[in-house]
Image (spheres, rainbow, N blue to C red):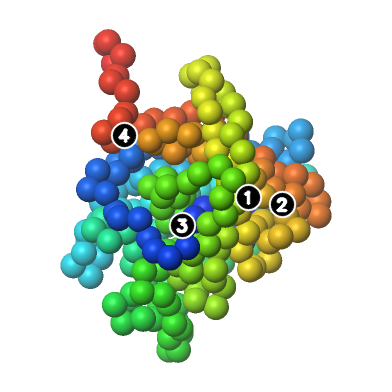
Amino acid sequence: MMLKTVAVALMALQGGGAPAVTASFPFAVGEKLTYTAKLGIISLGSGTLEVAAKDSIRGSEAFRFKFRLQGKTIFYSLDDVLESWVGTGDFTSLRFVQDFVENDKPRHKRYEIYADSGFFREDGKEKTEPTPTDPLDDAAFFYFVRITPLEVGKKYVYPRYFRKDKNPVTIEVTKREKMDLPDGSEVNCLVLHPVIDTQGMFSKRSDTRLWLTDDSRRIPVQIRTRFPFGTITLRLKEMVLAGPDAPAPAPGK
């Protein structure tokens, strides 16, 4: 559940309409971001966020995004994976898979999302549930926020979460703040305060903050949230970039 709630809140749009999906995304297959995970000052483990592939889902080309969080302390362990398939043309979710192993208890859920028909279905269940016309799932929000206009001092509201009854998601852009990237360079970041009507990391009481680079790539640099048992921080430690703005490889590499 921890990984699911991390991703849910990374969706922001100005009320009244979605931005046009650009033909050239600031990410591409091969991009991989790696994070340290800490509980307070205690090392918890690591996380990765990657553009894993382009697949075909029901005849539509789709990015496959993958987010994995692994960690262990003396009282808690987890290995959570989210995978999301998002259309490259309209940037809406087509399929979403959750594989969670927390304290050695596995849980698996798979959702097929049919935006054109207005419903989604969880694997193994007959009943369908309503979905918006342009749905996004938890992992997709990491990438959606990277192609969305954001301004300091504004609050964004948009009902695109694939579970229609959990909308809207809100994100307030609170300020700019300088952060260091893994290569040692200092960059300006937008600091976001995301809230969603669910329990967990992005509930109002969790007071989550997300740092995104304030440039064309919008790289997630840090996520910090409060839980009853302490504060969890994910901090970017390594990045392999791909796409139109990726740096050229160093000579000899």
Q: Tell me the number on the disc at residue 193.
A: 1
Circle 2 is placed at which residue position? 207
Q: Position of residue 18 (x, y in %)?
A: 37, 60
Q: Position of residue 35 (x, y in %)?
A: 55, 36
Indicate the quadrant where residue 204 lies. bottom right
Q: Nearer the viewer, mark 2 or mark 4?
A: 2
Q: Earlier in the sequence, mark 3 or mark 1?
A: 3
Q: Earlier in the sequence, mark 1 or mark 2?
A: 1
Quarter of the image where the C terminus is located? top left
C-alpha span from label 4 to label 3:
25 Å
Q: Tell me the number on the disc at residue 13.
A: 3
C-alpha span from label 2 to label 4:
32 Å
Give whichever of 194, 107 is nearer the camera: 194
**Helix, strand or loop at disc 1?**
strand
Q: Earlier in the sequence, mark 4 or mark 3?
A: 3
Categorize mark 3 by other alpha carbons within 10 Å: few (<14), some (14-19), many (20+): many
Q: Tell me the number on the disc at residue 242.
A: 4
C-alpha span from label 3 to label 2:
20 Å
Q: Nearer the viewer, mark 4 or mark 3?
A: 3
**Helix, strand or loop at disc 3?**
loop
In this rendering, position of residue 61 left or right of residue 102: left
Q: Earlier in the sequence, mark 3 or mark 2?
A: 3
Q: Are marks 1 and 2 in contact (CB under 8 Å)?
A: yes
Going by the numbered disc 1, the residue's amino acid type is His
